[in-house]
Amino acid sequence: MARDLPIGNGSLLVSFDQQYCIRDCYFPLVGQENHTAGHRFYLGVWTQGLFSWVSDESWERQLAYEPNTLATQVSLQNTKLGLSIVASDVVDFQQNVLIRRFRITNLNPAVTEVRLFLHHDFHV
């Protein structure tokens, strides 16, 4: 099945679906064992007593790559939560490491606490 954002280095391949969930994680041989077994790895956001997975319909998503790279450039926005997130993911080209960065912007006038939740469902 085709995925929207694959990133890898030849030994580690991670791919994201159209809802920005990790759906594939191949290591150490790309194309052999998928350590997700096709299950989703979710990203969740909590703020002001409300929780939402970014795969929910309330999120607007734009998935792309940073220009001339294999680094993701994902824009997420949820008006109900009043948050905007710019996410970037990359697999290091020398070491088998997935690096994720999240820049969160509060769209509300009041200061608020934000928590990110990463749900992984490995099948190793």
Image (spheres, helix red, strand yellow):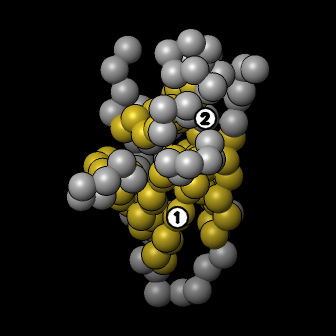
- The span from disc 1 to disc 2 (Cα, nearest Å) is 16 Å
Picture disc at residue 123: none
| Residue at 48% across, 32% down | 10
State whether residue 16 appears in this view.
Answer: no
Quadrant location of the C terminus in the rendered image? top right
Tell me the quarter of the picture where residue 114 sits. Answer: bottom right
| Residue at 36% across, 48% down | 70
Q: Mark 1 belongs to which amino acid? A: Phe
The furthest residue to the right: 124
Tell me the quarter of the picture where residue 40 sits. Answer: top right
Q: Is residue 81 above or below residue 3?
A: below
Q: Secondary structure at mark 1?
A: strand
Mark 2 is surrounded, within 10 Å at the Cα level, by few (under 14), some (14 to 19) or many (20 or more) other residues, namely some
Q: Is residue 70 above or below residue 25?
A: below
* 27 displayed left or right of 71: right
Residue placed under numbered mark 1 in the picture: 102
* 46 displayed left or right of 88: right
In the image, 57 versus 86, the foreground residue is: 86
Residue 34 is situated, as x and y percent measured from the top left of the image, at: 59, 18
Residue placed under numbered mark 2 in the picture: 41
Tell me the quarter of the picture where residue 1 sits. Answer: top left
State whether residue 4 appears in this view.
Answer: yes
